[in-house]
Amino acid sequence: MPQIWVGDLNVHYELKGNGDPLLMIMGLSFSLLDWGDELPDELAKQYQVILFDNRDAGRTISSLVKSYTIADLADDAAGLLEELGIKQAHVFGVSMGGMVAQQFALRHASKLNKLILGCTMAGGTCSIPANLTNLLGGSLFNFLFTPSYLADPNNKKKAQEFLVKTSPFHSKENGFVRQMKAIASHDTCNALQDIKAPTLVITGDSDVAIPPGNSDVLVQKISGAKLATIKDAAHGFAYSHYDKKQN
């Protein structure tokens, strides 16, 4: 997979398919591998899918080790599009990537077509606090998947193989801390009304990491935003429920 310089970052990315560009932004600690293959491959039937690793995750390398904000990560994403010669894209971000997508919409509106926010939050005082216990030394199974999903032996085996493949590319100690600090600074509560792009908000109804009520806040504050709730889905719905219909 190719890499390209974006400022002080050597960004690791992957392109799939043809059509309107769709930039996909992954969440805290995770790399582009954590999208799995099914969803990107399905989307690539209609779009040019752009996957990449954020700062301090996967195989993106920074020439400078420094603190940053969610807004900085949004600038990284916009810079990647510029380096790839893409003037405008749909943007789909999940979890921390959804926070980055919000800032992308606010800071780089001219580069944005449509916005998709998955299992994410506005931060600040208008949000229900996230529960990252299982990500911080707990079970990623409980963080990403529902008990009923894992009760199926085939699903459990698939999830185990998925984590064996993806975990080596998750953020390491200092990088993880820098991403956590960026999340702590995230607050779009009083800016969401400035997002003008058509917006779809997606959540799993059983997400214990970022409670579904946070999606209600986003829909209320972003004019015209629509909500899609996936039944019996947790924080990892983009992997576990990529082919499921919403409410």
Image: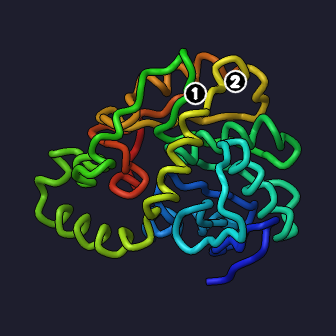
What amino acid does circle 1 point to?
Answer: Ala
Q: Are marks 1 and 2 in contact (CB under 8 Å)?
A: yes
- Mark 2: which secondary structure? helix
The quarter of the displayed image where residue 242 is located: bottom left
Identify the residue shown where x is 74% and y is 56%.
76
Q: Is residue 193 left or right of residue 65?
A: right
- Mark 1: which secondary structure? loop
Q: Where is residue 154? Give x, y as percent.
A: 16, 66
Sequence-wise, the earlier of marks 1 and 2 is 1
What amino acid does circle 2 point to?
Answer: Leu
Identify the residue shown where x is 44% and y is 71%.
169
Rounded to the nearest whole Å, what is the CA distance between mark 1 and mark 2? Answer: 8 Å
The image's mark for residue 192 is 2
Q: Nearer the viewer, residue 7 or 90?
A: 7
**Above or below: residue 222 compared with residue 29:** above
Identify the residue shown where x is 41% and y is 38%.
246
Where is mark 1, residue-wise? 122
